[in-house]
């Protein structure tokens, strides 16, 4: 097998990352693991069909022994002992990377998944920025002349990189004419260039692993790590990975995920937004019992969401792993004090619930929110770096509780439908322009929240759900009309040029996703065809 680089638009300094040695390493990863990735993706489809038909998922009988036997994950390295505040955000442009590293957070989740549009420039640029950061040379000059540099007066955040999920391909590296595996490209380039540098800095090659649907996918990551460490002469067990529990089948395999990666595992994270998306996707044909109320009505205190987070803390702490909280998506405003105060209050309440439940730290999407999260966890943890020793043996969670999505109070409304279509359109357009995260109506929107938006619309059509505020059922005609109206609204807001470049294609894409008979697994799959 050979790996061929198809790079029609040369990227500045790409040759520093796409070296023959780095590409040979990525090729070796593909040789050993790409076929297994393909098999696991095929298995996802079969499992989803079954769940959609039966409306049922359960803990796996075949892995009972794993759940009932005694084992622990590897101890956390010093750099990951204290994760009370984690900033998230893309590693491109360099300004964002510098702001995140300087933010005062303990950890920065450098994102090549939900918050990144995987243009080739962003993929290569992310690894380049992360390498410059590890070398201490990352800098940036804004158009207005403002200079950005890494701070030297306080510690920088420890970097935990999140590669793309297993579902995404990479069009710029072909293996025997077939597209590469995005996750192997991101991990491979990062590990090749940064593993040693990070270790020299007292940190290490640390990763967040997104969107897994089965412990067998974690086993694949473990094999990738074992091979990568041996190939580059890095000691076995040096890598640490935090797995996102952000799909509904993964909620039934938390123990198994940790077990598969136990020599490399650092913890689990409650990725609430993709989790909701996954519930819609899995139970798309399972009838009205699985119709989620308006996105804005679903809170983390809804019983089915609480069951999920409580089980996550219990599982992690029983196994010596970190339980990491998720993203309250409200964004502060430096211009509007009222918006700012509301955002701070909401984030504080979210983090207080998490810290009280036993989480060891949590995520924020914006640097101004770092002190809020820090204060809440400081109050709970005091001098301790984490609360992994706090067992939650009091928690008992059943399959029924995890699947009881109607336990959320709220309703489906035309306002909610309209908002979903606006967000899906606006986000997809921004994504197509090469940016993976954006603030809309004071909320952070990224690939996960946009997936919920478009998937909810599809689900309402499929169930002909009657809207609470208008009394009408959701039909394709209604959705087409509202989509046109929201598209026109955006045309007025962004102007003709931007509309033609990104919003018109986004409209076509969102219309296909919402109106098609078949549910499309990820919006980023057809969207990628337009940027590849
Ligand atoms: C579901 C999930 O997976 S959640 C995790 C994935 N999602 C994310 O990580 C989203 C992260 N957040 C973001 O990308 C941003 O906060 C956005 C796009 C939502 C809003 O960003 P902006 O519109 O730039 O916000 P705003 O204008 O208030 O920013 C103020 C400053 O903070 C910086 N900033 C804001 N968010 C971030 C961030 N996440 N990382 C680094 N810097 C940031 C901005 O660059 C800006 O810097 P400047 O003053 O030097 O120009
Ligand atoms: O990745 C996090 C999520 O909520 O999705
Ligand atoms: Mg996610």
Image: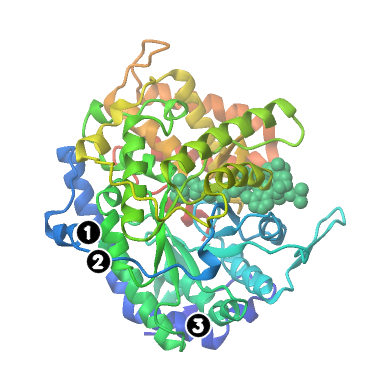
Residue, x 18% and y 37% (percent of image)? Answer: 55
The residue wearing badge 2 is 39
In the image: residue 265, left or right of residue 248: right
Q: Which of the 4 quarters of the picture holds residue 226?
A: bottom left
- Secondary structure under tag 1 reads helix
In this rendering, the answer to whether 224 lies above or below 525 is below
Looking at marks 3 and 2 on the same chain, the residue that comes earlier in the sequence is marked by 3
Q: Position of residue 240 (x, y in %)?
A: 44, 69
Question: Residue at (24%, 35%) from the top-left corner?
Answer: 401
Q: Disc 2 on helix, strand or loop?
A: helix
Q: From where the camera sits, is residue 273 visible? A: yes
Q: Quadrant of residue 513?
A: top left
Q: Quadrant of residue 343?
A: top right
Q: What residue did someone put label 3 on?
A: 23
In three-dimensional space, the C-alpha distance between marks 1 and 3, rounded to whole angstroms, equals 29 Å
Q: Depth check: give the residue in front, 104 or 168.
A: 104
Q: Mark 2 to mark 1: distance in Å?
A: 6 Å
Disc 3/disc 2 C-alpha distance (Å): 24 Å
In this rendering, position of residue 411 left or right of residue 396? right
- Identify the element where label 3 is drawn: helix
In the image as oriented, which residue stretches furthest toward the left?
A: 61
Determine whether, in the image, residue 272 is placed left or right of residue 498.
left
Residue of label 1: 43
């Amino acid at each position: 097998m050979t790996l061929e680089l198809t790079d029609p638009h040369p990227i500045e300094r790409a040759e520093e990352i796409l070296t023959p040695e780095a590409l040979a390493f990525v090729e070796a990863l593909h040789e050993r693991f790409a076929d297994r990735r393909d098999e696991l993706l095929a298995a996802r489809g079969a499992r989803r069909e079954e769940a959609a038909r039966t409306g049922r998922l359960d803990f796996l009988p075949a892995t009972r022994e794993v759940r009932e036997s005694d084992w622990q994950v590897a101890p956390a390295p010093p750099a990951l002992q204290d994760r009370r505040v984690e900033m998230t955000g893309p590693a491109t442009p360099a300004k964002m990377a510098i702001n995140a590293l300087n933010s005062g957070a303990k950890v920065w989740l450098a994102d090549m998944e939900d918050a990144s549009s995987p243009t080739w420039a962003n993929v290569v640029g992310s690894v380049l920025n992360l390498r410059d950061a590890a070398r201490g040379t990352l800098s940036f000059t804004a158009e207005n002349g403002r200079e950005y540099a890494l701070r030297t007066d306080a510690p920088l955040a420890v970097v935990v990189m999140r590669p793309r999920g297993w579902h995404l391909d990479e069009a710029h590296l072909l293996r025997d004419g077939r597209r590469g595996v995005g996750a192997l490209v991101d991990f491979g380039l990062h590990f090749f260039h940064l593993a040693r540098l990070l270790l020299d800095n007292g940190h290490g090659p640390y990763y967040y692993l997104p969107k897994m649907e089965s412990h067998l996918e974690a086993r694949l990551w473990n094999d990738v790590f074992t091979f990568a460490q041996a190939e580059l002469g890095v000691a076995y067990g040096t890598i640490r990975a935090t797995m996102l529990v952000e799909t509904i089948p993964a909620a039934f395999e938390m123990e198994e995920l940790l077990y598969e990666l136990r020599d490399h595992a650092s913890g689990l994270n409650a990725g609430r937004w993709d989790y909701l998306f996954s519930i819609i996707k899995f139970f798309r044909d399972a009838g009205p019992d699985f119709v989620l109320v308006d996105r804005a009505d679903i809170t983390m205190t809804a019983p089915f969401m609480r069951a999920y987070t409580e089980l996550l803390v219990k599982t992690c702490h029983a196994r010596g792993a970190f339980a990491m909280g998720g993203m309250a998506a409200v964004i502060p405003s430096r211009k509007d004090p009222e918006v700012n105060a509301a955002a701070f209050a909401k984030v504080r309440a979210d983090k207080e619930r998490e810290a009280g439940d036993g989480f060891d730290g949590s995520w924020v999407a914006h640097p101004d929110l770092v002190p809020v999260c820090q204060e809440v966890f400081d109050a709970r943890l005091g001098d301790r770096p984490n609360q992994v020793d706090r067992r939650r043996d009091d928690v008992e969670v059943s399959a029924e509780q995890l699947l009881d999505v109607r336990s959320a109070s709220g309703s489906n409304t035309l306002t909610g439908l309209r908002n979903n279509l606006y967000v899906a359109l606006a986000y997809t357009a921004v994504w197509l322009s090469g940016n993976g995260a954006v603030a809309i109506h004071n909320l952070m929107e990224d690939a996960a929240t946009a997936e919920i938006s478009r998937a909810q619309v599809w689900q309402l059509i499929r169930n002909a759900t009657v809207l609470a505020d208008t009394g009408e059922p959701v039909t394709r005609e209604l959705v087409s009309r509202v989509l046109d109206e929201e598209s026109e609204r955006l045309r007025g807001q962004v102007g003709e040029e931007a509309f033609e470049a990104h919003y018109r294609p986004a409209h076509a894409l969102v219309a296909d996703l919402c109106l098609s008979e078949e549910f499309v697994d990820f919006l980023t799959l057809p969207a990628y065809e337009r940027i590849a």
